[in-house]
Amino acid sequence: MKTQASQHIRSGSRPRNAAGIRARLSGPLVAVAAVSFAVGVVSGGISYLQRSPHREAYVGGTAAWGPHLVLFVLAVIAAGVVWRHRRADPGGLLLLAPLGVTAAKRLERTVSSVFRHPTALLRLLIAIVPMAILVYSPWRIGQQIFAGLDPNFTVDAWGGPTYLGALACHYLDAAVLMAAAAGLLNLLLLPAAPRPPAPPAPGR
């Protein structure tokens, strides 16, 4: 019994769920996000290595903690809604949906329907902005890791002048922007092509 229990723990729902999530992620979309993040880390490191020895003075009122506190409360409320949706749809990707296979199929169908669907071109033109946000945000997140170590980089930043404060505010901004961009794309992109009907069972 002990062996069976340990096997059940090792082969429990978490590994299966992780494997299922990986299977539902789009390789090209994940690669774009990973490359953007990596380029951001490298550019942030270069910015730190080229930092100026001259310390800039802090300007009061630039931290913008008040607006970010409001934004944080709204983000927590939105996270609660997302959690409720997760309980209703435990198989959904939710926060990883912009990197999912379904998202890739919807983008591919929208692009391929430019000359067939009356609104496909307009949808794509509007979608340029949210797609740019989803590509830019991982870069900005990666850049902050090393560039933020430069005191001049965070002295007048939102959440500055400390490294952790600027990191928290900029990551919060990035999370909200990416969530809003993903929601807008969900409205803009055409639905994925329907599956072909299943063949009739033999004998029918």
Image: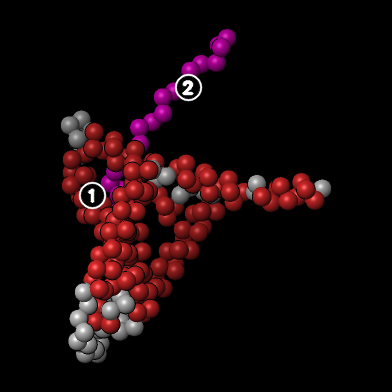
Vertical placement of 54 versus 97: above or below? below
Give the residues drawn in magenta, as a range: 184-204
Instruction: Residue 115: tell me if it is visible.
Output: yes
**Amino acid type at image mark 1:** Ala
Q: Quadrant of residue 142?
A: bottom left
Circle 1 crowding by C-alpha within 10 Å: few under 14, some 14–19, many from 20: many
Q: Main secondary structure of the magenta part?
A: loop
- Depth order, front residue of 12/85: 12
Instruction: Residue 63: tell me if it is visible.
Output: no
Query: Residue at coordinates 34% horizontally, 53% vertically from top-left?
Result: 34
Vertical placement of 144 versus 185: above or below? below
Mark number, residue 95? none
Label 2 secondary element: loop
Vertical placement of 74 versus 123: above or below? below
**Dot 1 or dot 2, earlier in sequence:** 1
Q: Which residue is mark 2?
A: 198
Image side of residue 183 versus residue 111, left or right: right
State how many labels appear: 2
x, y (%) of residue 199?
A: 48, 18
The reply to whether discs 1 and 2 touch (Cβ–Cβ < 8 Å) is no
Q: Quadrant of residue 192?
A: top left
Q: Which residue is mark 1?
A: 127
**Amino acid type at image mark 2:** Ala
Query: Residue at coordinates 23% horizontally, 37% vertically from top-left?
Result: 111
- Depth order, front residue of 158/90: 158
x, y (%) of residue 8?
A: 70, 48
Residue 193 belongs to magenta span? yes
